[in-house]
Image (cartoon, rainbow, N blue to C red):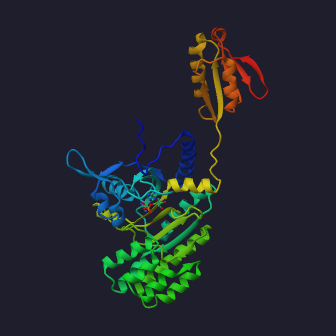
Amino acid sequence: MKIENPKGTRDFTPTVMRDREYVEKTMSNVLEGFNFEKISTPIFEYSELFELKSGEDIKNRMYTFDDKGGRKLCLRPELTASVARMFSNELRNLPKPLRLYYFGPMFRYEEPQKGRYREFYQLGVELLGVSGVFSDALAIYAACECLKRLGLEFELQINSLGVVRGLLEELGVDDKVSGKLITLLDEGKREGVKEVLDDEIFERLIKISGGKKSLGEAEKVLKGFDKALAALSELRDLAILLDSAGIAYTIDFGIVRGLDYYTGTVFEIRVSGLGAQNQICGGGRYDNLIEVFGGPKTPAVGFAFGFDRVCEALILQSKLKPPEKKVVVVASVSGKSDGYAIKVAGELVRNLSESEFIVDLDVSGRKLKKTLEQASNMGSGWVVIVWEKEEKEKMITLRDMEKNSQKTVT
Ligand code: HAM
């Protein structure tokens, strides 16, 4: 009986996993270099954790179920809410700011297509207990540095939700309509905005996009809207910081993010050529979420990479090149030397574990000639050959595959 994997999920073969491990390790190294520490939270959670603040879109896409005890659970669709919960329950008394990162599968009931899955992976970062654009800039810098370390070319877009929300508030637009507008913008349906809110100033604002000059354009459009202007001034500060830090960006007042908890800076990273699912990273500031889970008022900023999309982008740009491992093959010539072969292989693994070598003990029982052929096919540079006699003498025969020569050594 052939059973397929569920729609929107994938199996990862050893070759694919090698690439993915390399990407994960490279990004983790950057984040750990910036003193972010790894955490892990449950794959399933109480549904209300995400229903409270993650937003309608996520709520509608959640995998929810009742367990045998009648608890309302769901597979996690994202991790910011889980981290906020963990912080409120366990980490609130630690010195701040707290730098955390995570990696793992998330689940959303989506229509699967290239770059969009029902089970997908995120590598995310949360910086908790600090407000202001300095920490926003660090989060953005860390995200960009992860991608640069991998050699990926990308585009960063920044905005402040404070500008957009500030204007809507000052225009007297109610929360429901604002929510609708944010969803439309997040889905890229800018043409539908006019039907929900026919306002010239708002229309003009969300069309502004470009370099630092767009801040001046927005300032003119927002004249008299003091809340929006205050947020704009913060966005200008962020832009100045990013300039000094050497980060290229576009300001786009139509970038709003689909999740409900964002309060200030928001940003997205895109890679061209990926088609419709070209957003490889999204994040922003969320200063009110932790209170929702009973924690003290704690400002925070974070982001998550769509890990699968990062890998796809690297393939697209021919940048996915994990370092090759060198294989040492261990061959036992007769059945009587098999135990010794295991011991020798074990000793090699113990001694070579920190280097780029891996040990392949041939347990097939095939003839030595075949093992050597196999080793050559694997691109192995060295074969360790053991005989019964060598066990007694505590020796091995080391064959240099390139020179086609061998010698017996201790
Ligand atoms: P998000 O924008 O919903 O944000 O997801 C972050 C990234 O995950 C997206 O930019 C995208 O690359 C990827 N992604 C989302 N859905 C899918 C899918 N169905 N298949 C493949 N990739 C997908 C968040 O989840 C926030 N928690 C990010 C954050 C952290 N904000 C602050 N801290």
Residue 194 sits above or below residue 238 on the image: below
Drawn side of residue 266 relative to residue 376, left or right: left
* Rendered-image quadrant of the C terminus: top right
Q: Residue at x 56, y 82 (%)?
A: 214
Instruction: Name the one closer to the observer, 19 or 341.
Output: 19
Total numbered badges shown on the rendered structure:
0
Residue at horizontal 66%, vertical 27%? 374
Residue situated furthest left in the rendering: 70
Report ligand 1 position as a quadrant. Answer: bottom left
Q: Residue furthest bottom?
A: 224
Asked whether 18 or 376 is in front, the reply is: 376
State the image coordinates of residue 14 (x, y, percent, origin top left).
54, 39
Above or below for 397 versus 69: above
Query: Residue pushed farthest front?
Result: 1
- Is residue 156 found left or right of 356 in the rendered image? left
* Residue 208 place in picture, x, y as percent: 52, 81
The answer to which quarter of the image holds residue 345 is top right
Report whether residue 92 is seen: no
Residue 11 is at least partly visible in this image: yes
Q: Is residue 6 above or below residue 296?
A: above
Residue displayed at 42% across by 44% down: 5
- Decide which of 237, 26 is in the foreground and name it: 26
Q: Quadrant of residue 340?
A: top right
On-image quarter of the N terminus: top left
Q: Name the side, left or right, on which 260 lies relative to 268.
A: left
Q: In x, y percent, where is residue 107?
A: 39, 53
Residue 45 rendering spot, x and y as whole percentages: 31, 51
